């Protein structure tokens, strides 16, 4: 399930390595030596005990140090985080079954509450932006964005890079340069030969993960991410966790709440993953195909309504025909020598995630069909400057999902299920299947069992789930299932008629009022409430875009 993280609404627009196994890691083969006694909520009893011990030690250090147990200083240049953001590192066990064994370092960022003292200060708000594979290090920058003033006054805003991400024990599965060699041919209807080629590529990718990560590979899991979060909470000096999770971060938050219900203070879970263990993760990925198809239709319908601006067609079908003309053209001659059918599909998948890219994507199609490929090349060509970060994100995404659960090991199952889906949802079905196919050949002997979210013996405090009704990446039924599992104290805020992935943070005033009120007071709006959709983006003509580019050359007004 690629719950992409390059963007997260207006509020976190500031957000979003060839590596051998580190020398301090044990040399034993990947995977535990044999079955161990299991904790009924997930993982083994030894891992649960190790997580408790690591958190106790972090809390003791925090109490003794008086500064949260984390030594926050100016951020390294590599993080590109200006003052007042400060950074620290958190040591956690690689393997929680061995809390005194090899340790890894996670990077953490923080901006202190602007109301630093007094009764109105409420502690730390920790954010996970999803992926898995996304870094939350830039989250504290939202303190300077409109609409966050009251939250930033009450809370320290804390971001972090989960294990494997960025500088947090970084994971790699292939040479990052391989991602920018393009163009990548990607047939809309793969032939048997195409499928055989992708199977071999998936095997090679999985083996690359094992070769580069070595003995560390089995330890990139949601359960370990939740244990790391437990230690981070303690190191911050917080008795209970206040958490904002987006996309995959909602699943992480739900797993944490199941494992540590007594340590939850408040949780906002935005764009919810379906936590049903039967759907983690193979079926969740199948569920994305019709969701993305709906959002691809929404984009085409919007373009059709603005036919006078873009001249791409007055109906969704006509816009699809324009897109296919572009796809056929780049299949013959890649745009700018770099954008083939794979790059084109990836760029337009972003339109199924975020409606704020609709004007740019429509303008690029229009310009290409007028004979100018520059816009399309600029938007869709791989960027060598971010190749290492993109490779790292994909590696972590793959490792976590493959380690978290069992996947079908025979390609015949994948072929049957995705062939059926592609008949009605062709836009993203096969690309998503091939992205996840390394899990069929994953070289870890024992996978995790998905946590039974909601099975905790204690009742949770009030939680807030937020979802867009037409979200393709995390389809709306997942929000209903998550709320059901979180229990009677949970509330669901739905943005109706909209489908942008990531609702919280400056896009919808109705949603944000409920989120702010909950974070500041703990009050939820009721079992289920509905908010009208945020306004659709305005079309931008090619002439307007040219004028905007000229204006961008002027010095900023300060």
Image: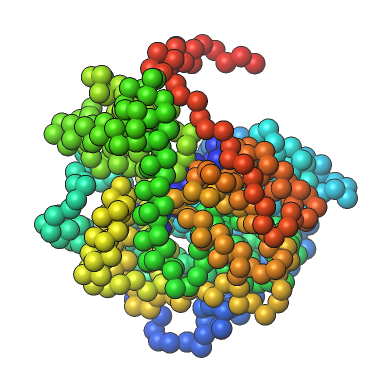
Residue 335 visible in the current orientation? yes
Identify the residue shown where x is 66% and y is 69%.
487
Is 53 rendered above or below residue 308?
Answer: below
Measuring from the top left, give residue 140's x and y in whole percent. 64, 43
Query: Quarter of the image containing the C terminus?
Result: top right
From the viewer's side, name the closer residue of 409 and 16: 409
Which quarter of the picture shows residue 439? bottom left
Identify the residue shown where x is 30% and y is 58%.
421
Does 504 sit left or right of 101 as displayed? right
Residue that protrudes farthest toward the front in the picture: 315
From the viewer's side, name the closer residue of 450 and 395: 450
Query: Quarter of the image containing the N terminus?
Result: bottom left
Does 288 sit left or right of 158 as displayed? left
Measuring from the top left, give residue 388's x and y in whole percent. 37, 45
Is 316 rendered above or below residue 456?
Answer: above
Which quarter of the picture shows residue 204? bottom left
Identify the residue shown where x is 73% and y is 63%.
462
Measuring from the top left, give residue 250's x and y in whole percent. 56, 59
Residue that protrudes farthest toward the left in the picture: 193
From the viewer's side, name the closer residue of 243 and 318: 318
From the viewer's side, name the closer residue of 105 and 418: 418
Residue 127 visible in the current orientation? no
Measuring from the top left, give residue 491's x and y in whole percent. 68, 59
Is 448 rendered above or below residue 362?
Answer: below
Q: How many marks?
A: 0
Identify the residue shown where x is 28% and y is 45%.
179
């Amino acid at each position: 399930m690629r719950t992409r993280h390059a963007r997260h609404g207006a509020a976190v627009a500031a957000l979003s390595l060839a590596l051998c196994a580190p020398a301090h890691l044990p040399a034993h083969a990947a995977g535990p030596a044999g079955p161990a006694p299991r904790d009924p909520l997930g993982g083994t009893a030894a891992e649960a005990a190790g997580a408790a011990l690591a958190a106790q030690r972090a809390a003791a250090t925090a109490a003794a140090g008086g500064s949260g147990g984390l030594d926050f200083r100016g951020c390294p240049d590599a993080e590109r985080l200006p003052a007042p953001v400060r950074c620290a590192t958190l040591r956690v066990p690689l393997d929680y079954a061995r809390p005194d064994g090899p340790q890894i370092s996670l990077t953490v960022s923080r901006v202190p509450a602007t109301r630093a003292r007094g009764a109105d200060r409420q502690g730390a708000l920790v954010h996970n932006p999803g992926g898995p594979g996304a870094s939350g290090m830039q989250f504290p920058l939202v303190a300077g964005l409109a609409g966050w003033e009251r939250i930033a006054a009450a809370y320290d805003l804390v971001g972090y890079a989960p294990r494997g991400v960025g500088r947090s024990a970084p994971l790699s599965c292939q040479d990052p340069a391989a991602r920018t060699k393009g163009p990548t041919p990607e047939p809309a209807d793969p032939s048997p030969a195409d499928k055989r080629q992708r199977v071999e590529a998936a095997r090679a990718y999985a083996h690359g993960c094992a070769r580069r990560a070595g003995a560390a590979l089995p330890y990139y899991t949601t359960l370990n991410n939740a244990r790391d979060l437990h230690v981070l909470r303690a190191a911050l000096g917080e008795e209970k966790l206040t958490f904002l999770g987006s996309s995959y971060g909602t699943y992480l938050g739900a797993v944490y709440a199941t494992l540590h219900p007594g340590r939850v203070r408040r949780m906002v879970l935005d764009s919810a993953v379906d936590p049903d263990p039967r759907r983690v993760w193979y079926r969740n990925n199948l569920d994305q195909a019709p969701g993305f198809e709906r959002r691809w239709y929404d984009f085409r319908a919007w373009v059709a309504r603005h036919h006078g601006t873009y001249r791409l067609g007055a109906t969704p079908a006509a816009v699809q025909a324009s897109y296919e003309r572009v796809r056929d053209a780049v299949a013959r001659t890649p745009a700018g020598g770099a954008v083939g059918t794979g790059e084109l599909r990836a760029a337009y998948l972003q339109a199924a995630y975020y409606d704020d890219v609709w004007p740019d994507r429509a303008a690029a199609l229009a310009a290409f069909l007028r004979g100018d490929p520059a816009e399309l090349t600029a938007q869709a060509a791989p960027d060598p400057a971010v190749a290492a970060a993109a490779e790292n994100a994909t590696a972590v995404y793959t490792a976590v999902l493959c380690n978290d659960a069992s996947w079908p090991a025979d390609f015949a199952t994948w072929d049957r299920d995705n062939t059926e889906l592609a008949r009605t949802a062709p836009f993203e079905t096969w690309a998503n299947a091939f992205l996840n196919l390394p899990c069929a050949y994953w070289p870890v002997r024992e996978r995790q069992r998905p946590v039974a979210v909601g099975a905790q013996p204690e009742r949770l405090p009030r939680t807030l789930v937020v979802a867009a009704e037409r979200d393709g990446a995390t389809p709306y039924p997942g929000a209903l299932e998550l709320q059901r599992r979180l229990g009677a104290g949970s509330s669901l805020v739905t943005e109706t008629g909209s489908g942008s992935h990531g609702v919280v943070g400056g896009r919808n005033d109705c949603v944000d009022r409920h989120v702010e009120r909950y974070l500041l007071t703990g009050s939820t709006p009721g079992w289920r409430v509905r908010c009208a959709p945020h306004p659709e983006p305005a079309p931008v003509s090619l002439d307007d875009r040219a004028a905007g580019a000229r204006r961008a050359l002027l010095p900023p007004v300060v």
